[in-house]
Amino acid sequence: MTGETGGLRKFVAPEFVCGAGAHRLAGQYAKNIGGRRVMLVTDPGVRAAGHASSVARVLEEAGVDFVLFDRVSQNPRVEEVADGARRFGEEGCNALVAVGGGSPMDCAKGIGIVAATGRPIEEFEGVDRIDRPGPPLLCIPTTAGSSADVSQFAILAAPDRRIKFAVISKIIVPDVSLLDPELLHTLSPALTANTGLDALTHAVEAYVSTGAGPVTDLFALSAIRRLTTYLPLAVRHPASPAYREETMLASLEAGLAFSNASLGAVHALAHSLGGLLDIPHGVCNAILLEHVVGCNFSWAPERYRAVAEAFGLNVVRAPREVVRAALIDRIATFRHGLGIDQTLSGCGMDAGDIPALTRSALLDPCMVTNPRVPDETMVRRCYERAL
Amino acid sequence: MSVPSERTYQDRLRESILGLGEHSTRKSHYPELQRRLDELERFRFLLDRSNDLFFLVRAADGRIVDANASACSRLGYGSRDLVGARFVDLLLEAEVLLIEQTVTARLRRDDEEPLWVEMTMQRARFSGEEYLVVVARDVTERNRILEALTESENRYRGVVQQVTDGILIVEPGGGAIEDTNRAVADLLGYSHFALLGLHTMDLFAPGSRLPDEGSTTVCQLLRSDGNPVPAEVTVTPITYGDDRVMHCFVIRDATARLEVERVRREAHEQLEQNILQFATLGDHIRNPLAVIVGLADLLGTPDAERIVQQAREIDRIVDQLDRGWIESEKVRSFLRRYY
Ligand SMILES: [Fe+2]
């Protein structure tokens, strides 16, 4: 913590409503935030699950006109953002409602920026680059993991450059999030696990972040505790409303923590990897987490001790090396228990990719708050161990 | 009306306190902003439909920061081309530009054709910055109508100037001369402009009465050299301009006509005199004839009988002449009546 503002902490969160049936407030909220003709941003999977149409029905009932936009891929692309922004303008929309996982929500954030500024989304890559607020954004998450519904992050892909880049700004924190566990029932066990592990990574990285503060700590540790207990149960009992609600709450907590404390090397490496391979973000994180913890541990041992305790490990008085080994083992066991036992090479990565991936990861804004100031050796080692 | 049960009321109150009420949303200026934007859009629509050209010019650098659709279309530029341009670059020609005064100017169209406008500038201050609001009215059409009007007026003026009768437009009651034509100037020996400086009375011989409205009178007019000119003057009231009633004097030179009348009058007088002489001629002959008949009777000779016979023949001839005089009297009165 250096510099004049080193000790200052800020917390920005959207207005959120959580609980069963929350998504039925979409019409009322769309109206209250000034929406007259809204763009309903979703993706084909979410449409197939019927969530887009149930939100559409709620909007109709409230008399809010909408335009559907579902051309969003798993890793939303710059051209999809541009396409959406063009339609947003052509159709005379004035607000955004995103229904889905991280992809439609990130895409909706991008659409809002481009619609407001008229400039391509690539120009806003980086931190605090947006000087004009977009139209209001209401998010209805259908996964419990990305937390894009509460975060200041939008991760977008530029396939022609084979990279994923982050747009980070408090201006893109959504206005409203309606967290409804009822919408999670259709999530497959694999997707539940992927997204849950993404949330777990958010919580861990936010807690050890150099930007962490007392408020984000509360949310981060609570999220870790909740996920370690309920994520395996939600994967095993997909129809249980109680477990679904716990994972949704955990995701919310993790989101509030990482949106304000930011992330670290796991996400930097995962973003870099996501530009190369089209593998789910949660899987990338899950594979990398234990290795990054290994590399970072000595730079924030007491923080990691608290993480280990939140994971349920009794390490209050244990020597640091013991805590380190126990935590790494616990994380690995946890993800294997959820069926995530891939390696990066298994996902299609090659040792030859490492130099390029390393270069790109070192430039990622998430690296800024990593407890250890990263260098090439550290990043390369993490990739090699996860290969 | 049924009174809501205590339970429902409590439920609703609880919902509201938890922020789940219909209007319970964190403060946002967006809905109000949208309403204002709508108003702005409506206003913009009106502004764009105006025939006048509107420019908002930043005082600091003279650059146009906004212009309405008419400004763009009338000058032939695209909707955003004008923004950022220097306003003076649009001015081909203008009178001295003064704040809050209307001046005539020519603006540069995209195709280099000039656009005639009437322009007014006003100072304005928005968000702490000085601006000039320029409102320009396209006067091309108005100028075209004015030209057509002038041409039509010139045509009528030409006709009025070329007729041989003199025409004077004057204020009633012998007032100022408002307009006149060439025939008056020629008749009285004034220039057109000298006439416009005179009063009606200046054109009439001293002591003349002005002709009455609606009448035709022969008057003595005065030439510029002081000589009188007889003229037949007809006065007609006319409406002149918007609401003024003026007199139109139509003046015809009467010199030639009066000369003809004089000759005719003299001929009549001579004729009348001759007829009167003729009428007394019979009586003049009959008197000595009666003496001749009386003397012949005194003679009592046969020759006297023949003398009386011849005298009666003469009397018959005189009677015939008397009857001829009656015919002549009829002719004379006919002549009097018709010539
Ligand atoms: Fe993530």
Image: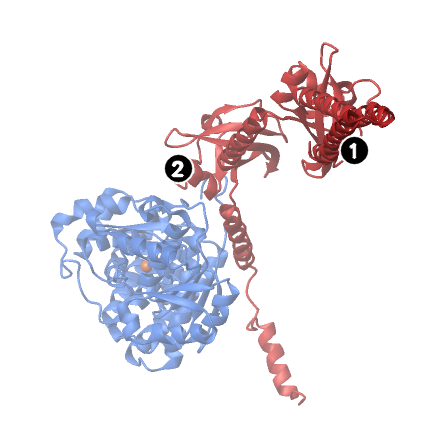
Chain colours: A blue, B red
Q: Is residue B105 above or below residue B3?
A: above
Decide if residue B176 is in sight here: no
The CA span between labels 1 and 2 is 65 Å
In percent of the image, x 49 and y 58: which residue is there?
A215
Chain letter, disc 1 residue: B
Q: In this orientation, which residue lies closer to the viewer: A119 or A313?
A: A119
Which is more N-terminal, label 2 or label 1? 2
- Mark carried by residue B77: 2
Mark 1 — residue? B212
* Circle 1 or circle 2, nearest the eye: 1
> x, y percentage for residue B44?
51, 48
Is residue B162 visible from the viewing direction of this image?
A: yes
Label 2 crowd (10 A; few <14 / some 14-19 / many >=20): some
Q: Nearer the viewer, residue B302 or A15?
A: B302
Q: Chain of mark 2?
A: B
Question: Residue B230: image x %, image y %?
Answer: 72, 20
Q: Amino acid at mark 1?
A: Asp
Residue at the spot 45% in from the left edge and 26% down from the top edge: B89
